[in-house]
Image: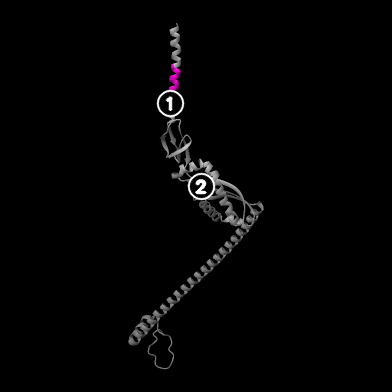
Amino acid sequence: MKRYMENGSIKPKRTIIDALIAIAFLTVIFDSTYTVNEGHVGIVKRFSEAQNQVSPGLHFKVPLIDSVEEIEVRTRKNEEKMASSTEEQMPVTVVVSVNWTVEKSAALELFRQYGGLSQFEQRILDPRFRSATKDVIPKFAAEQLIQDRASAIQLIERNLIEEMKNFPVTVDNIQIENIELPAKYIASIETKQTEKNLADAEKHKLARQNLEAQRGVNTAKAKADGINLVAIAEAESIRIKGLAEAEAITAKAKALGNNPLIIKLTEAQNWDGKLPATILGNGNMPILDLRAK
């Protein structure tokens, strides 16, 4: 009985030990591999000290000793809402955003100096971004700031690039997302724009009327030119016809003059077979009137 108890107590203890060994083994196996997501680099830390960086994919590390932290190397966007004033000292609130990218080759150095992207943004990027923006906005009048955002964006971008040139990041582009001005000023701008639109519409209307009038003049001129061309053509036709008739008469007269018998022939061809009933003048009657009884 005693031997059975001893054997029975030994088996459960060995089972627990085997289970613990298996769990420890699996933990070591799973803790020795890790993956880095696409668009990131992995910073391998040994006892919290950054050792090296690795590219996306599957990697191995020393279990329970090494740890890995990812740093995004894709384009990131930071947005700031800040109060400022325009050139004419009008209060304005602007929402400005910046797209920026960590240089992949310098991710390890950035981590060693700043401890990660969040701290880099809070300590380096955001303060300089706000400074670059607030330095530019007061150089623009309110109306100019609304109508010509591109110029303001260009100046902010130039300032920020200069501020960030010694850091391992690239400033991609900047956008002014929104501009908030006092309501009364916005209303005055809208009124001014409405008046400008009405004036432009009136100019367009006058230009259209002038175009239509010019079109009418051109149509009338074209019509008159057409009539003139028709008259010229008709006159030329009559002239040519008259010349032809004159030439025909001249030719006929010349023919008659050269051959007097043609006159007799023409008279004979045109005679209707009737003799004249009376003869005027003195002299003998060459033809007798056979109709007399």
Quarter holding the C terminus? bottom left
Q: Residue 240 carries which label?
A: none
Classify 242 as above or below 35: below
- Give amino acid for label 2: Asn
In x, y percent, where is residue 107?
Answer: 46, 43
Which of the two discs, 1 and 2, sits closer to the camera?
1
User: In 3D space, how far apart are the residues under numbered discs 1 and 2 (Cα atoms)?
Assistant: 43 Å
Q: Range of the magenta residues? A: 14-23
Q: Is residue 98 visible?
A: yes
Q: Give the prevailing secondary structure in the magenta stretch.
A: helix
**Which kind of residue does numbered mark 1 sit on?**
Leu
Would you place residue 212 above or below residue 185 in this image? below
* Quarter location, residue 196: bottom right
Q: Where is residue 288 in the image (x, y as percent from the top left)?
A: 38, 87
* Residue sitting at the far right: 184
Element carrying mark 2: strand
The number of numbered badges drawn on the structure is 2
Q: Measuring from the top left, give residue 189's x and y in whole percent.
A: 63, 56
Q: Nearer the viewer, residue 253 or 106?
A: 106
> Which residue is at the far top?
1
Residue plotted at (58% across, 53% down)? 135
The residue drawn where x is 54% and y is 46% is 124
Residue that numbered label 2 is attached to: 99
Coloured how? Answer: one colour
- Callout 1: SS: helix
> What residue is disc 1 on?
26
